[in-house]
Amino acid sequence: MLVFDDRKTMILITEISLVPDTKQWFVYMLECADGSLYTGVSNDLAKRVETHNAGKGAKYTRSRLPVKLVYSEIAPDKGEALKKEIKMKQLSRVDKLNLINQPPV
């Protein structure tokens, strides 16, 4: 079960959960317990966040639990998701925070 602090994230996860066996890919950003940001890609966002919080996700997040989903974006395929991930990782922290705080479209 996923528990989130904000309404925007809960709505996002609920919408994703309503689409079974989706082929969509997501690029996402997590806020770690130490305040750092982690960016990744997945085709099952809810499951990936659960994996991170179970300590079985990326090595970076394992020592920074719990993590909270703060941003996600749909990509048409894995390749595009990976390209978006690289671009997001190159952003400054300030730019990442601005991206996170944009109102949903």
Image: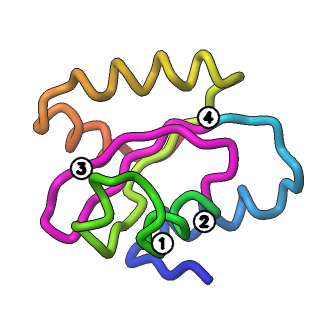
- Neighbor class of circle 4 (other Cα within 10 Å; few <14, some 14-19, many 20+) is some
Q: Residues within 10 Å of mark 1 (few under 14, many from 20)?
A: few
Asked if the residue under mark 2 is in contact with the one under mark 1, i.e. CB atoms within 8 Å, the reply is yes
Q: Position of residue 57 (x, y in %)?
A: 46, 58
**Considering the numbered disc 2 on the image, is that residue within a helix, a strand or a loop?**
helix
Q: Which span is picked out in magenta?
A: 26-46
**Are the two marked residues, 4 and 3, in contact with CB atoms closer than 8 angstroms?**
no
Closer to the chain start, of discs 4 and 1, is 1
On residue 74, the disc is: 4
Q: Which residue is mark 1?
A: 7
- The residue under label 2 is which amino acid type? Ile
Q: Does 12 sit above or below residue 37?
A: below
Cα distance in 3D space between marks 2 and 3: 21 Å
Considering only order in the chain, which callout, 3 or 4, is on the residue closer to the N terminus? 3
- Work out how far the residue at label 3 is from the one at label 1, CA to CA, in angstroms: 20 Å
Point out which mark residue 11 bears: 2
Q: CA distance from mark 4 to mark 1?
A: 19 Å
In whole angstroms, how far apart are the C-alphas of marks 1 and 2? Answer: 6 Å
Choose between 40 and 73: the one closer to the eye: 40
Numbered disc in front, either 2 or 3: 3
For disc 3, the marked residue is: 37
Q: Residue at x 23, y 21 (%)?
A: 90
The residue at 47%/75% (across/down) is 54
Label 3 sits on a secondary structure element that is strand
Secondary structure found at label 1: helix
**Is residue 87 on the magenta stretch?**
no
Q: Where's residue 17, x and y in %?
A: 76, 63
Side (left or right) of 104 relative to 30: right
Residue at x 37% of width, y 56% of height: 70
Q: Earlier in the sequence, mark 2 or mark 3?
A: 2
Q: Are the residues at dot 4 and dot 2 in contact (C-beta closer than 8 Å)?
A: no
